[in-house]
Image (cartoon, helix red, strand yellow):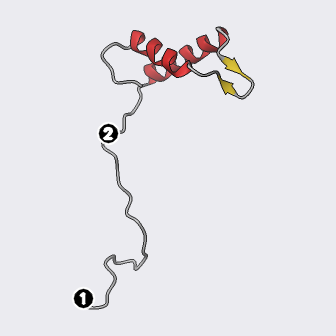
Amino acid sequence: MDGKPDNPSGVRGRKRTVHTTRRVWTFAEECELMSCLNDLVAKGYKCDNGFKSGYLLLLENMLSIKFPGTDLK
């Protein structure tokens, strides 16, 4: 060790890691997500502070019907 910092800027901190499992939604998928959320609101799953419990399962099922074979969750 020669007393120099490991990184050239001399700033200590954590390194940022990039998750390769991150998924980017297409425009069509985002539009369907909004459509499905609007359907849930129309069915009464919206309450004062957000959505009622159990809406995520319904939303996931709705999206799997619209986009079969994708990993949307």
Asked which secondary structure carries label 2, the reply is: loop
As drawn, the label of residue 54 is none
* Screen quadrant of the C terminus: top left
Q: Residue at x 32, y 87 (%)?
A: 4
Q: Is residue 45 rendered to the left or right of residue 9?
A: right
Position in image of residue 45 (x %, y %): 64, 15
Position in image of residue 71 (x %, y %): 34, 24
47 or 7, nearer to the observer: 47
The quadrant where residue 8 appears: bottom left
Q: Which amino acid does label 1 sit on?
A: Met
Q: Is residue 34 rendered to the left or right of residue 7?
A: right
Mark 2 to mark 1 CA distance (whole Å):
37 Å
Q: Residue at x 41, y 29 (%)?
A: 25
Residue for badge 2:
21
Asked which secondary structure carries label 1, the reply is: loop
Pick whichever of labels 2 and 1 is earlier in the sequence.
1
